[in-house]
Image: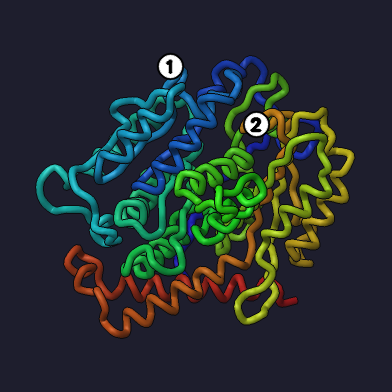
Amino acid sequence: MAQTHPLPPVTTVTRGGGGGGDCPPGDEENIQKMSLIWLQVGQCGNQIGQEWWQILSSNVAEADRFPYFSRDGLINAICVDSEPKVIRKLRQQVKNGYFRDNNIIVGRRGRGKNWAYGYHGNSTGAEKNLLERTMEAFRKEVERRDCYSGTVILHSLCGGTGAGLGSRLCEEIRDTYPAGYILSVTGAPHDTGDSPLQHYNSLLCLAWMQRFCDGVLLFQNDEVMKRVASLVEKKTFTASGLQPSVSLSSMNAHIASCLAGLLCPVYSLKTKSSVSIGLEPWELIRSLCPMSTMKFLHTSHVSRRGAPSWDKVTSSVVQSVPRADPHGRLHHSLSVLAVARNSQDYSFLLSRDSVLMKLRQAYRCVSWNPSPVYCWTDPLNIVDPSCHSLTVCANHSSAADLMSGVLCKARTMYNAGAYLHWYRRYGCEDDHFQMSFEILNSLVDEYRGLGVP
């Protein structure tokens, strides 16, 4: 079993019960600098980051910006890619926010969709310093804070930069700043068609996430595409009457909306003076990942206009929850978090008990967890103030389906010796693969054992 990082202690700041202490008197001004660092790695990570920062820079109130923006108004993000094209577009598209120039880390050539190339890097030239430059920028961001609380890293499982360099950065940050949390926002590739190396890259990256992250928000491209297609189908059709195709941008926008539902400031976690200190990512980990061996999270998000009918919204959420694996085994959840945001005055509270009971049943929460469902509320929906939204995140055994598929396909390729020379060329040895196979096999067994009494 791979070693995992124990969760650091959390001081929960709440209003109206449900947590630990309050902000110390007189510290409201200084505590605004107790914020996290956002780290966007590779094409996928920076494209999701682009949608995320467009939401944050346009819609979040000034009082709620400090966990995500520095005192000088610059965005708390480090953007890393081995090619400049995506980051150049990111800086152009985020109109109302500015990135620190020293936090833009770009190389001159890609990583060939090869985990080993991304992880170990190039041994010559300017490319050699991509990791060092990123960690230097990270160190300076940590030093700008009164208290470093953790990192949210956005990346993919299958790209050479996102998977390989993303894995290496998680390892370096864990070793250098062991007390901070690491929350990964990970894009998983389509089941087929992204790259012939995607199964190796996913295998190695998932193993590194299990070893060095505290929580992983896992977004599978096939599931995201299906969800976005269902939303588009309800809104519009092409001239021929056929459902329009789903764009990569709309998929990234959906993931960013899920992140906004989960990680934007909520009333439940603000201080008595209504200051947000950015506890949301860390309280999410504390609530959903009580066991360090299981940390992969499934997210569903629904937004509706008009007067809120929370029972209907909940029914829409649970429709997208995977019910069983390909062999018919029912899925279960270790824990569930529901975040309700709406433009009405606390209307969710009237339906709260019935909604949480429906979620507990639909997600099949394990019987041995006495308090498996958590709930946060906020009176505003920053993505669209005219809508009410429900975002549900669960430590759900459907993660084992993805891992089983990756294990099967990667093992078949590995036994045939396919493409292994491309990995050995950059220092990835058989031990890396064997360790990753063992970690994922153990993880699949853990998740499939959730429903066993």
What amino acid is labelled 2 in the image?
Asp
- The residue carrying mark 2 is 384
**In front here: 396 or 222?**
222
**In front here: 255 or 13?**
255
Quarter that holds the C terminus: bottom right
**Spot occupied by residue 205 in the image (x, y as percentages of width and height):** 39, 61
Q: Is residue 289 above or below residue 387?
A: below
Q: Is residue 75 above or below residue 235?
A: above
Q: Quadrant of residue 2?
A: bottom left
Left or right: residue 198 compared with residue 273 = left
**Spot occupied by residue 373 in the image (x, y as percentages of width and height):** 76, 53
Left or right: residue 59 compared with residue 450 = left
- Extreme residue toward the front, this view: 240
- The residue carrying mark 1 is 72
Q: Is residue 145 above or below residue 165?
A: above
Please give the name of the residue rendered at 41% of the width and 58% of the height, measured from the top-left corner: 157
Callout in the foreground (2, 1)? 2
Q: In terms of secondary structure, where does tag 1 sit?
A: loop
Please give the name of the residue rendered at 39% of the width and 50% of the height, measured from the top-left corner: 170
How much space separates mark 2 and mark 1, taking CA atoms?
A: 27 Å
Left or right: residue 408 compared with residue 259 = left
Circle 1 residues within 10 Å: few <14, some 14–19, many ≥20: few
What amino acid is labelled 1 in the image?
Asp
Q: Count every numbered label the image shows and give the total.
A: 2
Circle 2 residues within 10 Å: few <14, some 14–19, many ≥20: some
Q: In terms of secondary structure, where does tag 2 sit?
A: loop
